[in-house]
Image (spheres, rainbow, N blue to C red):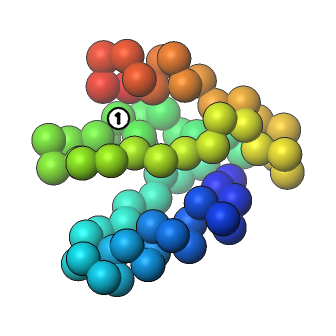
Amino acid sequence: MEHHSNIIPWQEACRKTGAELVYVYLKDGALDMDDLRSKLTDKVKFVSLAHASNVLGVVNPIKEITQNGS
């Protein structure tokens, strides 16, 4: 779902710093919220995602994601 312009900079940052880039799975073309919740651990330092996909037409539930750890 993420645009190329959002993935490449994070891949480069991980390559330079040794950080790990973790992807959230999709379910029916939308973020799999259960998968997202399972990956939001205390080790996570940063989350980056598109608010809307111009390819899939999905609008991610940003308010839900940013409240209460998703």
Give the structural element (helix, strand or loop) at label 1. Answer: helix
**Amino acid carrying mark 1 in the image:** Arg
Quarter of the rendering containing residue 53 = top right
What residue is disc 1 on?
A: 37
Instruction: Name the residue: 66% across, 65% down.
Output: 5
Q: Find residue 47 and report its horizontal and vertical position in percent.
A: 40, 45
Q: Find residue 27 and report its horizontal and vertical position in percent.
A: 62, 43
Tell whether 1 sits left or right of 33: right
Instruction: Name the residue: 24% across, 77% down.
Output: 17
Q: Locate the C terminus and report the quarter of the image it occupies.
A: top left
Tell whether 60 sits left or right of 40: right
Q: Most extreme residue toward the left, as rendered?
A: 42
Q: Is residue 69 above or below residue 40?
A: above
Residue 32 or 47: which is nearer the viewer? 47
Classed neighbour count for the residue bearing mark 1: other residues with Cα under 10 Å, few (<14), some (14–19), many (≥20): few
Quarter of the rendering containing residue 52 = top right
Total marks in image:
1
